[in-house]
Image (cartoon, helix red, strand yellow):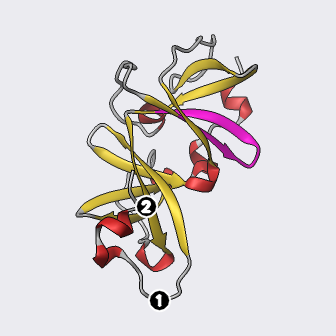
Amino acid sequence: MTNAAERDPSSADTTNAEHTEYLSFRIGESEYSVDIMSVREIRGWTKTTSLPHAPRFVRGVINLRGTVLPVVDLAMRLGLDETEPEDRNVIIVVDANERVMGLRVDAVSDILSVTDDQLQTPPDIATATTAPFVKALTIFDDRMVRLLDLEVVLPNSDEIAA
């Protein structure tokens, strides 16, 4: 993976503005990202063990070095079309305020280096179900990337409890 600012000189900021790095990934034809500081690791797809009475977007749990890790199907959580997991899918293990979970995505794309002035507020036309999940938008190499708010995306333990 290469840094987007290295590939596209026009996206590089020449001032001393602080850059934040985001891990971008695909779900279907859309591209999303999360702050790279919240990413613990990226794993290949592993079959999950389902939990009775868990929400539909919780695929189940996996054993991550002796720890039970819930896996959220990010497409389903965002209200997108449901697809069956494939071997080429990836689990991004994230930590947001001590909530550690896996996010099932189609593929990891890139690491983006972004300044605050490159982030745009999402328009108010988003549907009620997806609006709170996207906290900003940015454009890299003519592609729109949505920055997710993990605090909102990750379910709390009450939502997952079986």
* Residue 75 spot, x, y in % from top left: 41, 34
Q: Is residue 106 magenta?
A: no
Q: Which residue is mark 1?
A: 15
Nearest to the observer: residue 157 or residue 63: 63
Q: Quadrant location of the C terminus? A: top right
Q: Which residue is mark 2?
A: 112
Residue 96 in view (yes/no): yes
Residue 123 in view (yes/no): no
Q: Quadrant of residue 10?
A: bottom left
Nearest to the observer: residue 7 or residue 126: 7
The residue drawn where x is 64% and y is 34% is 101
Q: Quadrant of residue 71?
A: top right
In this view, which residue lies farthest toward the bottom?
A: 15
The majority secondary structure of the magenta stretch comes to strand
Q: Which residues are magenta?
A: 92-104
Q: Is residue 70 above or below residue 12?
A: above
Q: Is residue 7 above or below residue 38?
A: below
> 149 left or right of 123?
right
Q: Give amino acid for label 1.
A: Thr
Label count reads: 2
Nearest to the observer: residue 85 or residue 8: 8
* Residue 87 spot, x, y in % from top left: 39, 19
Task: Give the CA distance from mark 2 to mark 1.
Answer: 17 Å
- Neighbour class for label 2 at 10 Å: few (<14), some, many (≥20)? many
Q: Earlier in the sequence, mark 2 or mark 1?
A: 1
The residue drawn where x is 76% and y is 44% is 98
The residue drawn where x is 53% and y is 87% is 16
Q: Give amino acid for label 2.
A: Leu
> 4 left or right of 66?
left
Nearest to the observer: residue 60 or residue 89: 89
Q: Is residue 73 above or below residue 146?
A: above
**Element class at badge 1:** loop
